[in-house]
Image (cartoon, grey):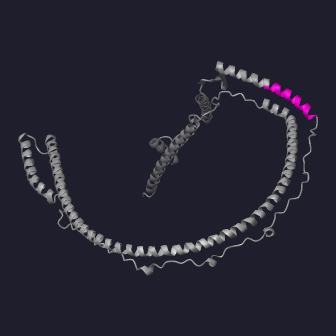
Amino acid sequence: MAGLFGGVTDLLFGSPPAAPAAPDYTGAAVAQGTANLEAARATAKLSNPNIYSPYGNQTVTYEGDVPTITQTLTPEAQKTLNEQQQGQYGLAALGNQGVANASQVFNTPFSFGGPAVQTSLAPVGALQNMPTGDQYGQAGSVNPNAYGQAGSVNANAYGQAQGGVAGPNLANTLDTSNVAKMPINAGTTAQQAIMARLEPQLQKNRVSTETQLINQGLRPGSEAYNNAAQLLGQQENDQRTQAVLQGLGLDMSANAQGYGQALSTGQFGNAANLAGFNANLANQQAGNQAIAQNFGQGVTAQQMANQAIGQNYGQGVTSQQMQNQAIAQNYGQGLSSAQGQNAVTAQQFNQNQQAAQFANTAQQQALAQAIQQRQLPLNEINALMSGSQIQNPQFQQYTGANVQAAPIANATAQQGAFAQNLYNQDVGSYNQNVAGLYGLGGSAAYGYAKRP
């Protein structure tokens, strides 16, 4: 029975699918390595170009996969480099000579035999004490009450000055009820009259123009008709604008004229009120001047009495000042004598201090000279060895970019997986067909066995 079904299966569906051949992974790996090597070579060549600059050249050559970088200076730069190297060599030789000189200096320990530092001054005389004021008497003072009390003038005894004059009631607002109003919206007042006359004319002109365009064969919506209509609209807009500006000018002129008339009326009333105020003010000032004159006469009389008191007081002050000056003169003479003696003492102290400072300055100068002689060989060596360094032109460093090789190995693996997937699908389909055939065969055999 199995043989029968196997033959039928081969007859209907053919032989089972053959498994795909295994991919050549070794060959793919070798090919991938070759591709990687070629990518690395391309990377090196693309990332390291030859460089030609005003200071020199840099070229890259290859022996197999080994790069060689050659840097060549221009003739002038090469001469400069040679001179710098020669100078560096000379400085190095001088530096070695300076080392020998420094060795001789440092073989001898440093010692300083200069003058010692001054720490004390020669003695001077003691300072004199300042004299006290009590030795020459006490200064006196003058009592102004001994010569009488100065008086003052009472202004109320000559009458009170007249009070201020009330100012006029000046107008601070204008009556603009009769002034022509400014237009609020376009098309009012004078503008309305001009526009009322212009609009019928514009409408009549538009109807005439549209009729003329139609008679010329132009129809609404055509380009020529629309251009003519647009030009007509611009002309109408210009006429309306001119009419609005003209009406606005007339309205503003009427408004300004009415405002000027109202302002003149207010100013006339204010001038009348101001004239009455000036007359009242003049009368008030005349009364105040009489009061001030009487007060001035009283002040003059009191001032004369006060001057007499002041004169007596001044004479007493002068007498007392003369006595005080005599006391101050005696005190000043005693003070000058003590200050003179102290000045002599201070001068002697300053001279002694300057002599000590001079000796200390000389000691510091001698110490600095000795230290400089000690350090001079080292400074010479540092100066010779720290000369300017040779500066070569800067070129691009040898670098490598990352050029990706073709993914041969990955593609081979994907191709194998694709073939295996197709094989699996074919096997699955074949197995389903065979299972279906076996199912039909089993049903037929079962029916045949039940036959009588």
State the residue in front, 369 or 3: 369
Asked whether the viewer can see residue 136, the reply is yes
Residue at the top extreme, as displayed: 75
Picture quarter containing residue 320?
Answer: bottom right
Asked whether the viewer can see residue 20, the reply is no
Q: Quadrant of the C terminus?
A: bottom left
- Report the side of 415 relative to 130 (left or right): left
Q: Does residue 70 lie above or below 10 as drawn?
A: above
Residue depicted at 12% across the width and 54% down the height: 194
Residue depicted at 17% across the width and 46% down the height: 234
Q: Does residue 12 lie above or below 289 as drawn?
A: above
**Location of residue 110 in the rendering, given as x and y in whole percent from the top left corner:** 92, 38
**Location of residue 430 in the rendering, given as x and y in whole percent from the top left corner:** 48, 46
Picture quarter containing residue 265?
Answer: bottom left
Taking the magenta stretch, the answer to whether it contains residue 98 is yes
State the residue in front, 368 or 191: 368
Q: Which span of residues is magenta-colored?
A: 91-107
Most common secondary structure along the magenta stretch: helix
**Location of residue 164 in the rendering, given as x and y in whole percent from the top left corner:** 36, 75
Residue depicted at 66% across the width and 23% down the height: 70
Q: Does residue 240 lie above or below 412 as drawn?
A: below
State the residue in front, 227 or 9: 227
**Location of residue 44 in the rendering, given as x and y in whole percent from the top left corner:** 61, 29
State the residue in front, 301 or 53: 301
Q: Does residue 32 lie above or below 209 as drawn?
A: above
- Report the side of 242 relative to 156 (left or right): left
Callout count: 0
